Amino acid sequence: MFMRIDKLQVELPAPKAADPNAASALQQLLGGKYGEMSTLGNYLFQSFNFRSKSKLRPFYGLVAAITAEELGHVELVSNGIAMLANGPDDEIVGPGDPSDAPYEFMKDVRSVSGFASHAGGAMPVNANSMSWNADFVTTTGNVIFDLLHNFHLECGARLHKLRVYETLSDPTGREVCGYLLVRGSVHAHAYALALKQLTGVDIEKMLPVPNIPLDRIPECQKYLDEGSHRRLYTFSETDYREIAGVWAGEALPTDPAGELEVVEGMPEGGKIHDLEGEPNVFAPDYAPEEMYEIAAKLFKKSR
């Protein structure tokens, strides 16, 4: 089962301005073939379907723990998309006149459906608004095949994150990419080490893919400095500790030196930005004052 924490895995800076096209680019990291929906879907169903869990605990635990982190990655990217689509956390002042075409500029953005259907929110689609496809999920029941597929998936995801990063200038999207580049490298390294244990092949020598050191990405630097590239989280207070049998040794030669470590629990995390309502979009409604008043009373009553 899963426990939910009301935080993002890391703090995201507020966007400089609303940029729906940048939000669309970031959608590739959510609903693209190598996006977070794919990594989550693959590891989720592989962990559900895993055979001989009790006998293969280190490998099962690895897939299960990374599954939980990927769920948080879906949340992180989704928040980044919504933040870019809506702009800074500024209060919207009252409804305007719909006949004045207050959102005329939206007709020229890449994915107008993100506004018209989803009020500037994230959806499991790629950068061109094509729906994420469950056919992207591979779960064969063969441990080595699935781990090899996962290694390929993480390398492909890293390539796509780098390409999307190179299209963005806003700090919000760049921070999402920087963090995920570091954590994606961790996952690729973990699957490589698991395959090495099972096959004897030094697959980790293939990393990094693509061959660009993370220290060349400014948004990656603080995560490297704090050792995030060496940490694998259990996302549980008591379970999955056996992943230490796989996640052991030294960091990749391309990353800052240090010993790999398993961390029980989860990252400290950061706040979830509070997107302001937009009356003209009926989000949460055209005249939301009564709704806010009811919510305030309920919140006060619950304390």
Image (cartoon, rainbow, N blue to C red):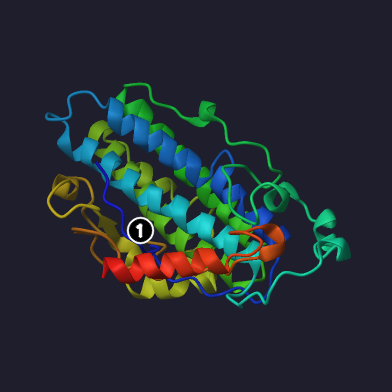
Residue 82 position by quadrant: bottom right
Q: Residue at x 81, y 62 (%)?
A: 98
Place of residue 161 in the rendered image (x, y in percent of width and height, measured from the top left): 56, 54
Q: Circle 1 sits on which residue?
A: 252
The reply, left or right, for residue 253 in relation to residue 208 is left
The reply, left or right, for residue 277 in relation to residue 207 is right
The reply, left or right, for residue 197 in relation to residue 133 is left
Residue 57 position by quadrant: top left
- Label 1 sits on a secondary structure element that is loop
Q: Which sits in the foreground, 291 or 45?
A: 291
Q: Residues within 10 Å of mark 1 (few under 14, many from 20)?
A: many
Compared to 52, does 83 lie above or below? below
Q: Which sits in the foreground, 218 or 72?
A: 72
Q: Is residue 272 visible?
A: no
Residue 259 position by quadrant: bottom left
Q: Which sits in the foreground, 62 or 75?
A: 75
Q: Residue at x 61, y 73 (%)?
A: 15
Q: Is residue 40 visible?
A: yes
Q: Residue at x 57, y 75 (%)?
A: 89
Q: Quadrant of the C terminus?
A: bottom left
Place of residue 142 in the rendered image (x, y in percent of width and height, measured from the top left): 32, 22
Q: Amino acid at mark 1?
A: Leu
Q: Quadrant of the N terminus?
A: top left
Place of residue 294 in the rendered image (x, y in percent of width and height, measured from the top left): 45, 65
